[in-house]
Image (spheres, helix red, strand yellow):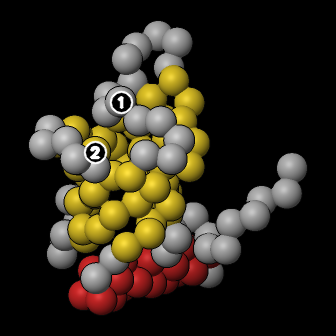
Amino acid sequence: MLDKRLFGRFEVKFDCYLALDKDFKVYQAHLLDLSLGGFRVITEAPLSAGKIVHFSFNSNPPIKGTARVVWVKKSAHSNQCEAGLEIIELKDRFRKALQDLINELTFSLSEAYFR
């Protein structure tokens, strides 16, 4: 299967928060991987493909924006799901913070590769 992603993904392990568009409830999620164009999470939020969500990564500094759910895989054993989201809106300061985080992850991988 051909991977059509424009950006490389990096495995990460930190929490994030999702709020469904027009819903005031905030759901906790666990970020699994991340790129400049999107991310993958595990969550109990009721996600479905096409839904718009507002997100906040529990990173330093925090990164906040809006994403569209691209795909969802429901768990057969719990009420959690795994989902892939495409970032559709990010203010400049958060885009810079995301780029800095990706650069840090890239540098960490490169450093480990050359040891």
Identify which residue, 10 or 41, lies in the foreground: 41
Expressed as whole percent of the image width and height from the top left, the position of residue 68 reads 46, 55
The residue singled out by tag 1 in the image is 46
Q: Is residue 77 above or below residue 63?
A: above
* 101 up-or-down from 27: above or below: below
Residue occupied by mark 2: 20
Seen at 44% across and 66% down, the residue is 87
- The reply to whether residue 77 is in sight is yes
Instruction: Give the side of residue 15 with respect to residue 51, left or right.
Output: left
Q: Position of residue 21 (x, y in %)?
A: 28, 49
Q: Residues within 10 Å of mark 1 (few under 14, many from 20)?
A: few
Quadrant of the image occupied by residue 2: bottom right
State the residue at coordinates (24%, 68%).
Answer: 64
Q: Which mark is residue 2?
A: none
Q: How many residues crowd mark 2 within 10 Å: few (<14), some (14–19), many (20+)?
A: some
* Above or below for 9 versus 32: below
Whole-percent x, y for residue 22 in the image: 22, 47
Left/right of residue 114 with respect to residue 92 in the rendered view: right
**Mark 2 touches mark 1? (CB < 8 Å):** yes
Q: Outermost residue toward the top?
A: 77
Q: Residue furthest left?
A: 24
* Amino acid type at image mark 1: Pro
Q: Is residue 95 above or below residue 76?
A: below
Q: Tag 1 or tag 2, which sits nearer the N-term?
A: 2
Q: Position of residue 56 (x, y in %)?
A: 23, 60
